[in-house]
Amino acid sequence: MTLDVRPRVPVAQNLLHRSRAAALASPVGVLDMRRCMACGFAWNAVFDASLVDYSAEYESDQSLSAAYRTHLDRVADTVEAALVGRDDVNAVEIGCGQGQVLALLAGRLGARAASLVGFDPTFRPASKLPPGARVEPVYFTEASRHLIGAAPDLVVTRHVIEHVADPLVFLRNIRAVCADGVPLVVETPNLQWILDNAVVQDLYYEHCSLFDAPALAAALAAAGFAVEAVGEAFGGQYLVAVARAGAPSSASRTAPVDNADYPARKAAAIARFEAALAADAAAGEVVALWGGASKGVTFALLVPDARRHLALAIDINPVRAGSFMPVTGIAVVPPQAARAAGVTKAYVMNPAYFAEIDAWCGAQGWALELAVPD
């Protein structure tokens, strides 16, 4: 079934643009998200990997949020549990960003960490890594997998598989370097959460491969992993799977949930937000989005009048300060600058951060009205 079609979307939501002109000229592609109603997998049928540039100007760090750090700690708990009884661990993270999780693993493993190796083309050489860690600034592929060095005792890949046009090839490349019994921890967006809640800002070009829990388990099994668990995390927004290299079980697949009404609910959600923005304008509100990355970028494009009604986007990541959102050219500023600009209302793009943002504003004495897209 067809989930969503958009003729002009940015191909890299999180690529930093340091001028409005560069943002307005951001490369675009076509989104044609479809879902297999036999297995639950969803994909962009017209995805072109050559359009996407994951470079040092790509910024996706969320670890400045206390709520997100709590999530990372829980993922680290899952990793530790998968490593019970293992010492001298050679740990590999595929899609390590600037090394935040490598540092977390170093702290958790301590003397048990024999080596820490990351792969990520967006890695910036100036980023601080824990002692003994190294990052290969390349994609993890059949051609680069030899750069792991020592055979891994653990592989972690978080928020990577959704960016891969052929996820089975990706998983099989991981399987090729893993001896039987080596644990793999995979984290990825939860397609079912997006569809059930009509989170219209969570479908975008970069995420060309999306899974519900049964589809992720089936992909892991097809790649040669025995799946131990696939659970929800971060308020249901993510899936975290634990699997081990080895013969998969022959468990039957669960039929996907029928979300045939998603396109209609998407249209209704956008109409409600258009009406809310119009009401804000009539009331004289100075409105911003809280979240200048993927979700904010998408929402500003989905709502036709958003660019006219939104003053700016707020983001706590200092690397994003002074940048502009792709295609719309909306300025991204830190909270203090938004306050100085007279922002009176902000729509929080990710509900998982609402309580944290509300508490921060209260502590600063900023009477900012907060809302989430309804």
Image (cartoon, grey):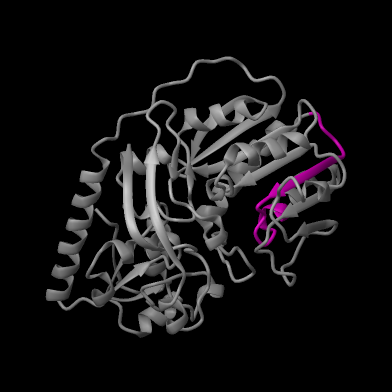
Percent of width and height locating residue 302: 29, 61
Q: Nearer the viewer, residue 96 or 53?
A: 53
Q: Nearer the viewer, residue 189 or 289?
A: 189
Percent of width and height locating residue 165: 55, 46
Q: How many marks?
A: 0
Residue 176 lies left or right of residue 203; in this view the side is: right
- Establish if 98 lies above or below 200: below
Residue at 72%, 58% (x, y): give it.
Answer: 138
Name the quadrant of the N terminus.
Answer: top left
Percent of width and height locating residue 120: 68, 57
Percent of width and height locating residue 84: 75, 30
Q: Nearer the viewer, residue 5 or 368?
A: 5
- Establish if 227 lies above or below 132: above
Residue at 13%, 68% (x, y): give it.
Answer: 279
Q: Nearer the viewer, residue 334 or 297?
A: 297
Q: Quadrant of residue 283?
A: bottom left
Residue 191 lies left or right of residue 222; in this view the side is: left
Q: Is residue 174 magenta?
A: no
Q: Quadrant of residue 39?
A: top left
Residue at 60%, 36% (x, y): give it.
Answer: 168
Residue 282 lies left or right of residue 23; in this view the side is: left
Q: Which residues are magenta?
A: 85-103
